Image (tube, rainbow, N blue to C red):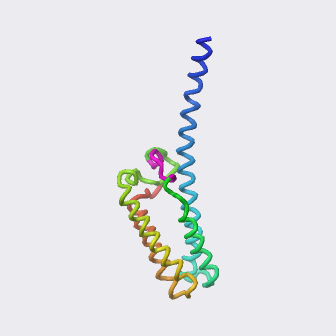
Amino acid sequence: MRKVLLSALIAAVPATMALAQSAEEETAKARRAFYTMLGYEMGGLAAMAQGKVDYDAETAKAHAADMVTLTTLHVGDFYAPGTSKDDLPGATRALPVIWEDMGAFQEKGQAFGAALMELNAAAGEGLDALRPAVGKVGGTCKACHDDFRAKDF
């Protein structure tokens, strides 16, 4: 009986470790999906701001509103420890410095949120209002990417 229990315990350890790794990978996957959705919405606004597609007030307002809605999610759980590029090579570009300096990372997020509120207010107010607001949001994205995201996986 002892041998059977010991064998079952030994067999369960790798499975438990695989589940833990899977949870970390799922966290990184969710984080990437969140930013993919933000990028999709921002892409529509950027295309208008750059003149690649015609400006449409209703579409611009919808893209901006969708971004605001996405930011109402509790994203803290997307940043669980053990989900950096060093922890999960090939699964994420999130640099370990996020967890080393969470305060600075959160400041970048707050700047993004403030710029996004301005964009939301400007989105339906014409192309001349949209362009600088899109640029400001894009600048906050770049600032965060420069400090906290690797260029590649």
Q: Nearer the viewer, residue 123 or 53?
A: 123
Q: Nearer the viewer, residue 87 or 65?
A: 65
Write down the quadrant of residue 62 in the picture: bottom right
Say above or below: 140 vs 55: above
Picture coordinates of residue 59 (x, y %)? Answer: 63, 79
Q: How many marks?
A: 0
Q: What range of the chain is rendered magenta? A: 77-85
Image quadrant holding the N terminus, namely top right
Picture coordinates of residue 90 (x, y %)? Answer: 51, 48
Assess whether residue 122 is covered by the magenta stretch.
Answer: no
Picture coordinates of residue 141 (x, y %)? Answer: 45, 67
Picture residue at 59% right of the left edge, 24% below the top: 11
Q: Main secondary structure of the magenta part?
A: loop
Picture residue at 56% right of the left edge, 83% below the top: 51
Picture residue at 55% right of the left edge, 87% below the top: 125
Is residue 53 shown left or right of residue 103? right
Q: Nearer the viewer, residue 91 or 115?
A: 115
Is residue 76 shown left or right of residue 66? left
Is residue 69 shown left or right of residue 118? right
Picture residue at 49% right of the left edge, 75% below the top: 117
